[in-house]
Image: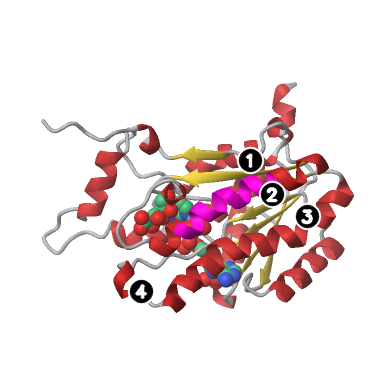
Amino acid sequence: MILNSFSLEGKVALVTGAAYGIGLAIARAFAEAGAKIVFNCSRQETVDRGLAAYKELGIDAKGYLCDVTDEEAVRAMVADIEKTVGTIDILVNNAGIIKRIPMENMDVEDFRRVVDVDLIVPFICAKAVIPGMIRKGHGKIINICSMMSELGRETVSAYAAAKGGLKMLTRNICSEYGANNIQCNGIGPGYIATEQTAPLREIQPDGSRHPFDQFIIAKTPAERWGTPEDLMGPAVFLASDASNFVNGHVLYVDGGILAYIGKQPK
Ligand code: NAP
Ligand code: GCO
C-alpha cells in the first residue's frame, strides 16, 4: 500500500525550536504519522510552553533546554536522546531567528548572530546526528529554508545570506551522505502567519492592514498567508520512505510566490 510508505511509525524525530509555529505543526504531523517527538528551545519558558502545547494535543513529547549554537550542548542532548528515546531517524533544523535591520545600520554582531543560528546551527545539529544515522543505515534531515533562500528584500541581509547558505548546506549534506542512505532536503515556507511574521501583519492605527500584509497577499497567487498546518503534509513526505529518492531538494511551500511575476497593474 503506497500510504504505508508515508508512515513514521516507531521513528525518532528531533525538531529544533518546536514549541510553537512551524516547528510545532511539523512535530504534530510527525506524531500523527507515528513518530516519537523530541524538541528543544534555548529558554526554559519556551520549553514549558512547548510541553504544554504537546500535552494539549495529546502528544507525548520530550523537551530539552538546549541552546543549539553550543556544539557541546547539542552533542550532550543527542547522546541523551539516543540513550533515553532512541537513535534519531529524523532531524528538522527549524530553530531560527530574524533581525530586520537595514544593512547600513546593522552591527556585525547582529549579522553574525543570525548566521550563527540560521546556518551554523543546522551544521552543528546535522553533524551531531549523522553518525547515528550512518550506524542505523538511514536518516532524514530537513532544513527549514525560506523565500529568502531564493529572493532578497530590504532589511533581511543576514537572514537571506543564512537561508541561501542553508539551501547549499542541504545540497552538500545530500552530496556527502547520499551513499549512506541519508536524504537531506529543505522546506522553503512562503509567508506563514506565526509570531515571527506578526510585526508584518500588525493592524495599523487607522484600522487598515499593514502595507506588508497587503503586499504579501498581492504577491501570493493563493492570495493568503500560509499557516503552519500547510507545512504538515510536505514535512511528512520528506521525513518518510515516500521520499527515499528525493535528495538535495528544496520544496517550496509558498502558495505559488516563486512562480509568480506579480499582479498586473489595472
Ligand atoms: P520562530 O519564532 O522563528 O521560532 C523559533 C523557535 O526556535 C523558538 O521555539 C525558539 O525558542 C527557538 N530558537 C531560536 N533560537 C534558538 C537557539 N539558539 N537554540 C534553541 N532554540 C532556538 O518560529 P517560526 O516562525 O515558526 O519559524 C520557524 C522556522 O521557520 C525558522 O527557521 C524560520 O526562519 C523559518 N521560516 C519562517 C517563516 C514564516 O513566515 N514564519 C517562513 C519561512 C521560514 P527560544 O526562543 O526559547 O530559543
Ligand atoms: C521577512 C519574513 C520572511 C519570512 C520567511 C519567508 O521579514 O521577509 O520574516 O523572511 O519569515 O522566511 O519565507
Q: Is residue 168 magenta?
A: yes
Tell me the residue that label 3 is attached to: 130
Q: Position of residue 123 (x, y in %)?
A: 66, 60
User: Label 1, label 2: how many angstroms apart (C-alpha)?
Assistant: 8 Å
Q: Which stretch did the figure color magenta?
A: 161-174
Tell me the residue that label 4 is attached to: 106
User: Label 1, label 3: how many angstroms apart (C-alpha)?
Assistant: 15 Å
Q: Is residue 215 magenta?
A: no
- The residue type indicated by label 1 comes to Gly
Q: Is residue 115 left or right of residue 87?
A: left
- The residue type indicated by label 3 comes to Ile
Tell me the residue that label 2 is attached to: 173
Q: Is residue 218 left or right of residue 140?
A: left
User: Label 3, label 2: how many angstroms apart (C-alpha)?
Assistant: 10 Å
- The residue type indicated by label 4 comes to Met
User: Label 2, label 4: how many angstroms apart (C-alpha)?
Assistant: 31 Å
